Amino acid sequence: MPSGGGLDWSVLGYSDTPQGIVDIYDYALYIQETWNASATNLSNKFMNNRALVIMPLVDTSKATNMSMMFYGCVNLSSMPLLDTNKVTNFSNMFASCSSLLNIPLFDLSSATNIQSMFNGCSSVVTVPQLDTSRISFFNGLFQGCSALENLPVLDTSSATN
């Protein structure tokens, strides 16, 4: 593995990539290499996993349930754009992910439940425009998102809760 992806760490006083960064990279690579692309139920997959800092891009094209997938991953800071076009349940997916900085433009076109999806994501500042036209359950969606500054208008026409 190249030292810090070819970065010159000496300008920061390091002779090589800091071990913590190597550990983060190695764990993300491990997730990617051992990923089960045929899994449909990803509920609780990484629940309360403190080692997860950056989620690698993995094949989630078969997934239908991502509820609580990253619940309590307090060190998770970055997410790639996962394939979510078949997912119906996103409830509590990122609840208590207090270090999460960005929310990718997830495909919510099949979703019906996004309740508490970002509850407690206290570092998120902006939310992309999300297709929420089929969502029934919204409650607690952005509760505890204390840094949130920009929120697009959400289509709540199908909301029952």
Image: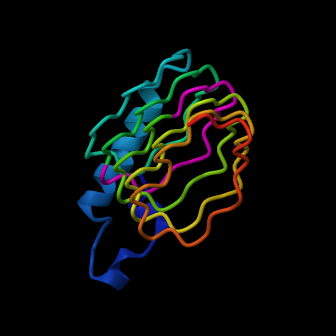
The quarter of the displayed image where residue 19 is located = bottom left
The front one of 135 and 53 is: 135
Residue at position x 54%, y 28% in the image: 89
Which residues make up the magenta segment? 74-90
In the picture, measured across the screen, residue 138 lies left or right of residue 94, that is: right
Residue at position x 55%, y 34% in the image: 58
Q: Work out which quarter of the rendered image holds the C terminus and state it.
A: top right
Image position, residue 52 (x, y; %): 33, 45
In the picture, measured across the screen, residue 143 lies left or right of residue 103, that is: left
Direction front: furthest residue: 160
Prevalent SS, magenta region: loop
Residue at position x 37%, y 54% in the image: 120
Q: How many marks?
A: 0
Above or below, comparing residue 118 to residue 39 in the picture: below
Image position, residue 17 (x, y; %): 32, 65
In the picture, measured across the screen, residue 101 lies left or right of residue 149, that is: left
The quarter of the displayed image where residue 116 is located = top left
Residue at position x 74%, y 41% in the image: 157
The front one of 140 and 7 is: 140
Above or below, comparing residue 93 to residue 35 in the picture: below
